[in-house]
Image: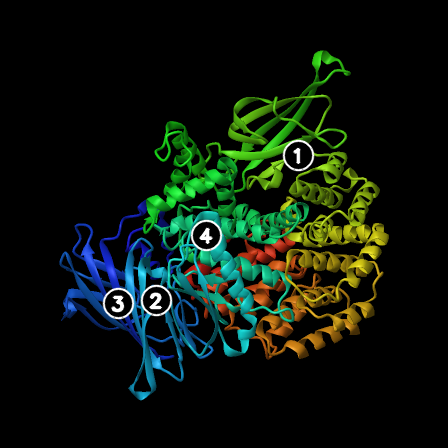
Amino acid sequence: MNARDALGPTNTTPTVILRQDYRPPSHRLSSVSLDFTLSLDATRVVNEFSFERAGDSAALHLHGDELTLVSIAVDGRPLKSDEFEYSPQHLQIHQLPTQGTIRIETLVNPTANTALMGLYASRGGLFTQCESEGFRRITYFLDRPDVMAMYRVVMRGSKSEFPVLLSNGNLILQQDLPGGLHEAHWHDPFPKPSYLFALVAADLDYLEETITTRSGKQALLQVYTRREDLSQADFALQSLKRAIFWDEKRYGLELDLERFMIVAVPDFNSGAMENKGLNLFNTKFVLADPQTATDIDYDGIESVVAHEYFHNWTGNRITCRDWFQLTLKEGLTVFRDSEFSSDMAAEGLSPQAAASARAVRRIDSVRVLRAAQFPEDSGPMSHPIRPDSYQEIRNFYTATVYEKGAEVIRMLQTLLGVDGFRRGMDLYFARHDGQAVTCEEFVNAMFDANASTAPQPDERSRNHAAQFMRWYDTSGTPKVRVSELYQHQSGDQDQSGTYSLTFTQELAKTSPQQAPLMIPIDLGLLDVSGKSCPLSDASISGDAERHGNVLLLKGSQATLSIPCQSRPVPSLLRDFSAPISLEFDYNSSQLLHLLAHDPDSFNRWEAAQRLMLDAMLKPNSVDLSLMISAFSRIASDTTLDHGYKASLLSLPSELYISEKVSVIDPGLIRAARDQLREKLAAGMIEPLRRLDHELQAASSAPYSPDPLSTGRRLLANLVQHYLALVGAISTQELLARFMSVSNMTDRMALLSTLLEFDGPPTQEALDRYFHQFQHHDLALDKWFAAQVTIPNEQALAHVRALMHHPKFDVSNPNRVRSVFGAFFNQNLPGFHRQDGVAYELWAEAVLTIDRRNSQLASRMARALDRWSRFEPVRRTAMKAALERVAADGQLSPDVREVVGKALG
């Protein structure tokens, strides 16, 4: 990407940015001084930076976005009008010396910045969001990730209006000024790209704690919130401490600043942002107490706090050369935070309980991947984890880049082992600390660190690195088809034989890369008694290697042959060892065998999911009575962890089911799922009653977000839901439980169950909830979302009513997501009504929000990505809605790219 390309479109014709067009920056910047005179509607920004020519060009082209230029000078001399040209979107200086200093003064209006990118106002304070291209909305600059510089920042403003002044790095000076003003001076001692700049000026309170790092240094940790929210900030602070100490222990990475700050922002487009030393967070991922936050909220806070802190090294100290390399920091850091969450879930537990807790975490990760990323891989926005092109980079902060990217990193750890992966990380930091690099540098470091000639590469390591890099250039979900063959020796049925598995990989036809991938497939074999068969005597034909129980498929096809006494049942892709779709024609007896005996907890759950899918999609292939008996035994099994048991007993989501059919008919999917869950509930009624009695008796214990307590609540609420479906618990009993609960997890579970039934108890619960939480933003978001995700056609009426509710605020991204986002993306039968009326609402919402916040609108526009896979009536209505949006003359580039790709 070169500087001019990165400006983006200035008219309705899309500008396509190509990875192959990358050029190094024309100039290097070593130091940046920013001076802010703060105001909600007219902030003055003085940007002074030193430059050095990096190539032959004497001209410098700077990025801008909706800026007002006040003045410009080079080496102290104001430029004449013919020495530069500018618009709100760019500034070009025609002739510069080989080195010098540029001073640019601009004015920005934070209150008018409803896009929430750059410097913007929220609830009387000023905040920034600069990734990916927000810094250019603050000042003219070389706003690209491969331009790294040291920053000094001075902020001044009204002390009564902005009593807290924060920026990156270390606080150098804070002082009062005449006229009720004050100022703060900050210095970040580490070079960073502009997207990591941050500023906060607001009336906030804070929690703080001083820690000692492993080298003995003192570091101050602070969490800032609105004063009324401060009591809910401690869990985030403790999560930050756990992340810091885990990173020291696992990777030897130490906090490198005197202080580390987190600021909770009510109006925020994403989850959080890893600005160096000053992380800005959506309040959703900071604030928690038992009355207002669910177990999922607590998990999210711990995970997101860790994710943003881990970026301090994987993203900040080493950053991306260009935005095509986004998965370099995001895929790696999602993997790191998932490993952290798994370790935290298992901490202090017995070996069996720890294994179950890790399995639940892994299952949850794969559920997210299959619900969000697999559909993306098969839709119009399909792209490799490192795209070759984009129109708007903001549209590529996707499940593919993040979640699939993390699974690609996980494969490296599977191939190299935990110790080998650590060696690779150590070499990566030793080689590239302080640099902006590409995905190749990371993968090369991984394989070089484990070469026979480490840290120098050998031929084998570089060949492996080159083949592994194909994952970065492959779009679509790879398929691996597996067939089996069992042959007795000499045809004698009484003799042992050879069991063979043939693996054939197939890439999506739309993928730009078609050469075979390196795919690790963790597997095992179970004999008739459920015991594991050894793989030590296995032989391989074809391009593959075996490392213990992992078959590393390197070519298009390979066969693994194992001597066995009898035909075993294969357990394939254990722990989901690769982000692929594995196709093996299991019959129901094989799946029941795996469900009963597989020592791999993930594949035991996978067997349960496949059985349920078959029962819904191929009902004649499953003996329902045998399946119900198997699940009844699981429900009665006292050796199973509660959280893992809940996972085993949970049906596949409607979104996942829709990925398993060739033509999507939401009504048929809903009917099949409802029918199966009611049959399961009725068939398991007695063990479910016993579980309900046992779990309700334990529900009076004080709330704790620890894994065992979380698992107990998860199972209790699932069991309660099943019993309510078949009338074993009445709506009056559900309401009584709702009125007496003492935590938000149980409260929301009961409300969601009640909402599946019409009647006075349901309305009473809704009214009670609103009365109790009407002044708590995050709790009220849950109230909105619960009503719009009722899985029936009445949900649309709830959406339209809630759009006119006094508490609905179209300027707040969380509230918009709780109504429109939840309805469009989480309510398959409600949104996809056969009359198509909800698609008209989608078009209205996308166009309305696009006028204010194009990033938020483009996310909502993705709800119709899969329109071409639906049955004809809905497909026609969705296409008409997409065409209506595409025809709008004021459409943002963000939304234009999404709907344009959807329509083809």
Q: Is residue 631 left or right of residue 867?
A: right
Report the amino acid beneath label 2. Asn
Q: Amino acid at mark 3?
A: Ser
Spatial CA span between label 4 and label 2? 21 Å
Of labels 4 and 2, earlier in sequence is 2
The answer to whether residue 627 of the structure is visible from this angle is yes
Res. 430 image quadrant:
top left
SS under mark 2: strand
Q: Which residue is mark 3?
A: 33
Is mark 2 in CB contact (under 8 Å) with mark 1? no
Dot 3: what SS?
A: strand
Q: Can you identify the residue that label 2 sits on?
A: 170
**Outermost top residue:** 490
Quadrant assignment, res 820: bottom right
Q: Position of residue 39 (x, y in %)?
A: 35, 79
| Separation (CA) of disc 1 from disc 3 | 59 Å
Closest to the observer: 725 or 699?
699
- Look at the numbered discs 3 and 2 and tell me whether their residues touch, using CB distance below 8 Å: no
